Amino acid sequence: MRDEYDAVIVGSGPNGLAAAITLARAGCSVLVCEANAAIGGGARSAELTLPGFVHDICSAVHPLAAGSPFFRALPLERFGLEWIQPEIPLAHPLDDGTAACLYRDVDFTAEQLRGDSSAYRRLMKPLARNWEKLANEFLQPMLHLPRHPMALARFGIPALCPANSLAKILFKHEAAQALFAGIAAHSFLPLESIASSAFGLVLGMAGHAVGWPIPRGGSQGIANALANYLRELGGKIEANHRVENLDDLPKSRAVLLDVSVWEFLHIARGQLPSAYRRRLESFRHAPGIFKIDYALSEPIPWKAEACRSAGTIHLGATMDEMAAAERDVARGKIPERPFVLVAQQSVFDETRAPRGQHTLWVYCHVPLNCGADMTDRIESQIERFATGFRDCILSRHKTRAADLEKSNPNLTGGDINGGAANLMQLIARPILSPTPYRTPMKGIYLCSSSTPPGGGVHGMCGYHAARVALHDCFSTRKP
Ligand SMILES: Cc1cc2nc3c(=O)[nH]c(=O)nc-3n(C[C@H](O)[C@H](O)[C@H](O)COP(=O)(O)OP(=O)(O)OC[C@H]3O[C@@H](n4cnc5c(N)ncnc54)[C@H](O)[C@@H]3O)c2cc1C
């Protein structure tokens, strides 16, 4: 029987669309099958609370998309993607009413961190200057020959450190320690873990190099721009098409799966060789999240002035408090004072809410599969830094960790990153190989965030997987 398509992609998340675009640009005919009615996976937006309030269902803030070497090579602006840079990328309020901030400018950021200015400058300046070189190095499988070994060593040595040790060695004062620890906590790792600094360094340097921008109109704008570009290249997308079994797909030479390791085990059903299957079964989840989307009657009354101009705000005050919260989560306990991540997109993007009113995107880390309602704990953290916050609430939309997978089979148990990003799973994601996208099944590739470089909206997993598929199945076509 003739192939219906050169390649079929399962899942229209950023990585699925990136894989489809890479293949279509090489001249392949591609079909994307998406389980959901809406395309985009982790880059979707919808009116979750009240009419006129547009919320980001998953991702909100996009240093990795703005800095992605692959996305930067695509004409996404032509397809409506517009980045908005909040005046301050990140603020971290402290209990004395001030806030430590990450500004675009490294020197200005350092100057504000009194007593730690030189240390901050020494750490971040060379990294931010080398963003392009470094992004190409760490946004691919760890097993590769580095093209920029010096720059990579300068990043890799501190990146391997536990975040709390690195912050204590480098910084004397609470403000700088807390700012760095809050960024490192995006890793979902206890701050005492090896390599928990990596996220602090990557997201910190990205903040200086490319900002922590938001897309005008919502994160759906990223998915729509990718999808519309794919359609211009001749690619097809079929929504409401959940793939339950690999045998049900239209015939093609290559199949790229933008699905988690656990969804792969489900849809491959008994077809995987046992050693590979056992390896996937031993792959570990990250903890989960509890998320609330708010419709607000007015902007949040932050005590620290800087928080009113920041796109993202981290609530956890001190490094010790955040370390305790992340430790609890890793041990399966619900933290009394969770580390809370906040994005206030409508302060910078008037399309997100009716005039004068606002949206708010908030989540905290919780144990995997946790069914607890964290609303009181989250709102106490916000009130601590913004007295009167509760009076601004018009409506809430809550998502428990255990419910996240209802809108995306990749989010089992509330794990938003396709598996833990500990050192072992950064190196072997999901297997130890320079091409971990290839599976033992001929023509079947994994391309989701369960492969390198892992979680985040950047499309690099999809791009690299598609290049491997092109090499194996379409050797005459060039990416
Ligand atoms: C609440 C939340 C907040 C986040 N915040 C940020 C952020 O601010 N910035 C950031 O960079 N990242 C953030 N992330 C992470 C980011 O969204 C993901 O890492 C990224 O979307 C992963 O992309 P992906 O293409 O691998 O998978 P996904 O985006 O999960 O897409 C996978 C797609 O495949 C579909 N699918 C799965 N199984 C099947 C099947 N069997 N058949 C058909 N279709 C299937 C799913 O429906 C989905 O559309 C967040 C994630 C969540 C959930």
Image (tube, grey):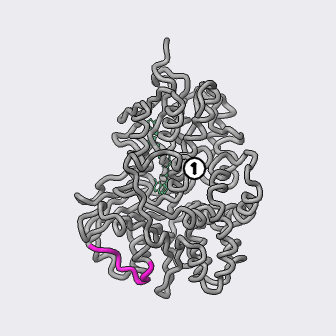
Name the spot of residue 56 as percent of width and height, x first: 38, 56
At label 1, the amino acid type is Pro
Above or below, 379 against 49 in this view is below
The residue drawn where x is 62% and y is 27% is: 441
Residue located at (62% from left, 24% from top): 476
Residue at position x 29%, y 55% in the image: 47
Q: Nearer the viewer, residue 265 or 307?
A: 307
Which residue is denoted by mark 1 in the rendering? 69
Classify 117 as above or below 146: below
Q: Report the side of 55 relative to 197 (left or right).
A: left
Q: Is residue 305 magenta?
A: yes
Instruction: Pick whichever, 281 or 408, lies toward us.
Output: 408
Tell me the quarter of the image containing the C terminus.
top right
Q: Is residue 309 left or right of residue 418?
A: left
Quarter of image, res 322: bottom right
Residue 285 position within the rendered picture, expressed as x and y whole percent measured from the top left = 57, 50
- Residue 388: image quadrant is bottom left
Q: Residue furthest top?
A: 1
Whether 77 is among the magenta residues is no
Q: Which residues are magenta?
A: 298-306
SS label for mark 1: helix
Q: Is residue 300 visible?
A: yes
